[in-house]
Image: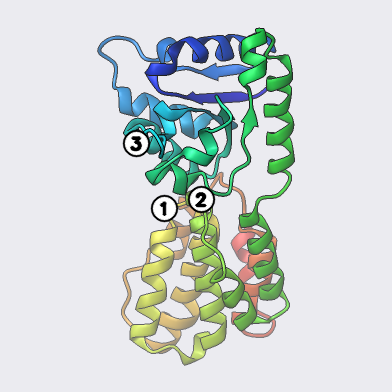
Amino acid sequence: MKNIFFSYSTKDSEAANKIVEGIKISGHHVWFAPDKILGGENYAKNIDEGIEQCDIFVLLASKNSVGNKSLKVEPSSHVCKEIQLALDEGKIIIPLNLDDRTKAESTGKAKYLLSDIQYIEISVALAEGDLTSVVEQIIAAADKISIKSQDEEYIEKAEIALVLGHLEQSSRLLGEHSYNKKNIARVDFIKALSNLMRKGINNLSISDANEFTSEFERLRHTSMASSSVYMLAILKVYCYQEKGFKNSIDDISTLKSSVKGDKHIDTKFRFVADGLLPIKSQFAVDWLI
């Protein structure tokens, strides 16, 4: 069962209602504006939450939603914002082609945002009133796409290079791709760790140390919290305290408490970061206690 966000132009309400009903009959949950947004509610907030929580973003692509070059129809600004939000969240986007010219004739920002995405033709199924095959194609396409995104492929390669000590290669791989919003924190953490390993903790100036601290403090408030706090602890003990630098990093017990209950630092990152520690250091073991 999938959670599906359905994006469309209100000018295509008749077709949208038929498609949404077909998806519901197939047993999937659908975020559909007429069902989800009641009078007086925060429209934008509801949409943001609906996109953030969905598994699949389904777009009813028509001249009204994505524009039409020949007819000089501009795309819907609301639909374009929803597509951008879905891309930022790293969601699987499945456009449904309402007529055989929609994809070719789309224009403006919609054309750019959907340039590399495969459309599903639905005009025949809609005319016949049987949307079973369309729903099956939506789910099959989503399952195929979700096996491994391009983001994951680049990140995994960069992580392998990092673990193997190929720091330049790791940074280069991360720079060859643009990432969805949900993966930015992980990418930034890998970059920061790679740069720190390359410089070496013993070679950091106070300005270097402050720069790394600032970055890990920022990442502390993201999905990379546990790993970032671990790096702050290492910097505090083996850079600031060793060199007598003043710092504003929390004490070790406070750092540990701040991520208590969260998953431990990713094993691969701990393995790499432990290369910064003195030989026979018990820091990593003590951190897990």
- Rendered residue at 29%/16% (across/down): 41
Q: Helix, strand, or loop for circle 2?
A: loop
Q: Could you tell me the amino acid type at mark 3?
A: Lys
Which residue matches tag 2? 223
Q: CA distance from mark 1 to mark 3?
A: 45 Å
Which residue matches tag 1? 221
Residue closest to the far bottom: 203
Q: Is residue 36 above or below residue 190?
A: above
Q: Could you tell me the amino acid type at mark 1?
A: His
Which residue matches tag 3? 72
Look at the image and tell me in which quarter the N terminus lies.
top right
Between 238 and 208, the one nearer to me in the picture: 208
- Rendered residue at 62%/65% (across/down): 286
N-term mark: 1 or 3: 3
N-term mark: 3 or 2: 3
Rendered location of residue 147, percent (x, y): 74, 44
Rendered location of residue 288, percent (x, y): 63, 59
| Label 2 packing within 10 angstroms: few (<14), some (14-19), many (20+) | some
Q: Could you tell me the amino acid type at mark 2?
A: Ser
Tally the numbered discs: 3
Image quadrant where residue 241 sits: bottom left
Q: CA distance from mark 2 to mark 1?
A: 7 Å
Nearest-to-viewer mark from 3 and 2: 3
Look at the image and tell me in which quarter the C terminus lies.
bottom right
Between 211 and 38, the one nearer to me in the picture: 38
Q: Is residue 230 in sight in this rendering?
A: no
